[in-house]
Image (tube, grey):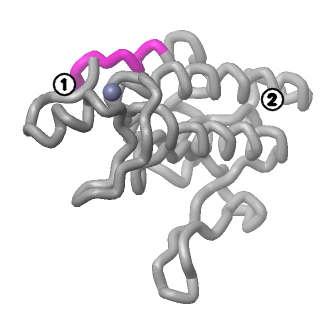
């Protein structure tokens, strides 16, 4: 059984954005795989996305309403993926990484430019917020790349549990 997490509040407060049922989807549901320190950032992003969707005239009860596919940490910063409905539309994917070096991934992106921008901003902001506890942090490129504050970094180096 999945253990309760702070992030469970997201599906309670944004049931349509974090819905599991509905249209055929491109992704299975992994949930939110981030430390608790990014909760406020992800919560605000969720609220902003719903506000932007409302402004764009989307119906919350339709399949057109944005749906979160996966939220995780990658290379030390936040990755927030919205779902892409079948049939796949190439405009809903972006290349991430370095195709010339053969190191890249396709990531789903929101059709609405405003939502795409909100996600990009939040992902960039995550490089300044400790994933462990939410204090100001910085991206640390050690053996394992992550964004931690000094305290969580020290705990991490001692092999202790980080965060709140
Ligand atoms: Zn911290």
Whole-number angstrom distance, CA of label 2 to CA of label 1? 33 Å
Q: Is residue 82 left or right of residue 143?
A: right
- The kind of secondary structure element at disc 1 is loop
Q: Residue 35 appears in which quarter of the rendering?
A: top left
* Residue 133 highlighted magenta (yes or no): no
Frontmost of labels 2 and 1 is 2
Image point (62%, 21%), residue name: 44
Q: Is residue 113 above or below residue 104?
A: above
Assess mark 2: CB under 8 A from ligand 1? no
Q: Is residue 106 left or right of residue 30?
A: right
Q: Is residue 65 above or below residue 143?
A: above
- Is 163 or 81 nearer to us in this picture? 163
- For the record, the magenta segment spans 1-9
Answer with mark 2 or mark 1, whichever residue precedes in sequence: 1
Position of the C terminus by quadrant: top left
Marking on residue 53? 2
Marking on residue 113? none
Judged by its main secondary structure, the magenta piece is loop
Q: Position of residue 149 (x, y in %)?
A: 35, 32
Image point (64%, 51%), residue name: 84
Ligand 1: image quarter: top left
Q: Which residue is farthest left?
A: 159
- Is 73 or 60 nearer to us in this picture? 73
Q: Position of residue 14 (x, y in %)?
A: 59, 17
Mark 1 closeness class: few <14, some 14–19, many ≥20 residues within 10 Å = few
Residue at the spot of label 1: 1
């Amino acid at each position: 059984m999945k253990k309760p997490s702070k992030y469970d509040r997201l599906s309670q407060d944004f049931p349509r954005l974090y819905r599991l049922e509905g249209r055929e989807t491109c992704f299975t549901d992994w949930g939110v795989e981030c430390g608790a320190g990014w909760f406020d950032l992800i919560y605000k992003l969720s609220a902003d996305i719903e506000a932007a969707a409302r402004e764009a005239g989307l119906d919350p009860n339709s399949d057109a309403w944005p749906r979160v596919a996966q939220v995780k940490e990658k290379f030390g910063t936040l990755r927030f993926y919205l779902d892409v409905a079948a049939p796949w539309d190439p405009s809903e994917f972006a290349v991430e990484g370095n195709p010339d070096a053969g190191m890249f991934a396709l990531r789903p992106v929101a059709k609405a430019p405003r939502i795409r921008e909100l996600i990009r901003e939040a992902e960039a902001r995550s490089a300044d917020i400790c994933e462990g506890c939410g204090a100001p942090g910085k991206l640390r490129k050690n053996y394992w790349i992550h964004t931690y504050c000094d305290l969580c970094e020290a705990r991490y180096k001692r092999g202790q549990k980080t965060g709140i």
